[in-house]
Amino acid sequence: MTILRRISRQIVKNSRKYSSEKSSPEPKYPTRVFSGIQPTGSIHLGNYLGAISQWVQLQNQNKDLILSIVDLHSITLPHEPKKLSRNILELTATLLACGIDPNKAILFQQSKVSAHAELCWCLGCISTMARLAHLPQYKEKSENLKNIPLGLFVYPVLQAADILSYKATHIPVGEDQVQQIQLCQELARIFNGRFGETFPIPRSLITSSEYGRVRSLRDPSKKMSKSDPDEKSRICMTDMPDTIARNIKKAVTDFTSEVTFDPVNRPGVSNLISIHSFVSGKSVNDICQEVQGIDTGKYKFVVADAVISYVKPIQEKIGHYLNDVGYLYGVLEEGNAKAAQIANVTLKEVHEKLGMTVEGRKRDDIVAKCV
Ligand code: AMP
Ligand code: TRP
């Protein structure tokens, strides 16, 4: 089965889940899909296969979809301000080029909706340091740091605030995000338990395992990542054809020359087959049969050609959008306003539940007593 078909099947299964939720007499929380992506550089095939292609499919199934460019998350590690502002624009252009339609989904910039940071504070007050210190992403990212920024520690609480600000019910992400979504579920439960029913318990939507975790080309035991210092470890949507060909040619495989799919024992070559299957729309089995007789060295040329042809039209669209920066700002501004409208209502409810609002007559009484 092709990867695209597999993803579609999973999404169809999920839609059945959605529709059964919808057909129940009165769903407490309407289905709402939320996800986020950091503007930390050009997006790579891992982001695309693991997350963005799923977002586009959900959008095209008319799901209520909210996507955030999570710039507050991207300053949790040292960054260059000029690069960040360029990255925000490039990411907006890339998401549009990949098929996100601002008329169907809300696409916005996290820092422009202050409710996220405010809800993060409230959720931070019900989070424990012990729980946050256990999260694998924190452990990984802080491992080589002498002085750990507080923001890096609080990162998953802000992520929970992103999701809960919209009372989102489904979160399409890559496999690496599962633990953070679990923390979000716990915080929603704790909040509901202490202060009264407020949030749905959101569920993660992960694409089938191979694509939920696209591997590094240099070290197939690791995921493909924007933060890997070795640029040859990934294929970015904006890479030139010769860079794509070079990186795939240098991909670490193993000492067997045949092309066979065995993610456990042959993760390197299997990763290439998965990527090839996705971009060509062919099944893993068909590919393995087709390339019988050629060795992994030659197979890399086949994969490179397929990837280059797949990303070419996307790259052309990215270039087109980047030529119209005014349009990109407009898309974000509109998205920011729509997102803020929803998130501010949730924040108001949270303030009320926490006892931080003094309303109506009560407030008049207090003012009268004070003067
Ligand atoms: P990030 O680049 O960390 O902001 O990730 C954006 C989205 O891409 C998240 O949903 C991640 O789970 C997903 N993602 C990142 N790297 C990979 C990968 N190597 N394989 C699959 N999904 C990924
Ligand atoms: N932490 C996510 C990542 O590194 C990005 C993110 C931030 C996110 N907030 C989110 C993803 C909310 C899903 C939902 O990829």
Image (cartoon, grey):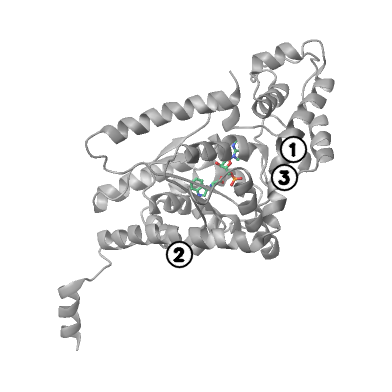
* Residue position for label 1: 233
Confirm or deny contact between disc 3 and disc 2 (CB under 8 A): no
- Specify the quadrant of the image occupied by residue 306: top right
Rendered residue at 39%/50% (across/down): 164
Residue at 82%, 40% (x, y): give it. Answer: 243
- In the image, is 233 to the left or to the right of 160? right
Q: Residue at x 37, y 62 (%)?
A: 344
Name the residue that disc number 3 marks. Answer: 315
Which image quarter holds the C terminus?
A: bottom left
Q: Amino acid at mark 2?
A: Ser
Image position, residue 320 (x, y; %): 70, 52
Q: 185 or 238: which is nearer to us?
A: 238
**N-term-proximal mark, 3 vs 1:** 1
Q: Nearer the viewer, mark 2 or mark 1?
A: 2
Kindly tell me whether mark 2's CB lies below 8 Å from ligand 2.
no
Identify residue for label 2: 114
Marks 2/1: CA distance? 36 Å
Report the Cα–Cα distance between label 3 and label 2: 33 Å
Which-is-in-front pick, marks 3 and 2? 3
Q: Amino acid at mark 3?
A: Gln
In this view of the protein, can residue 126 be seen by the observer? Answer: yes
Mark 2 falls on what kind of element?
loop
Taking 41 as reference, is 198 left or right?
left
Residue 346, horizontal then vertical, whole percent: 34, 57
Rendered view: 224 above or below 294:
below
Task: Please determine whether, in this image, residue 300 is positioned above or below residue 186.
Answer: above
> In the image, is residue 86 above or below residue 234?
below
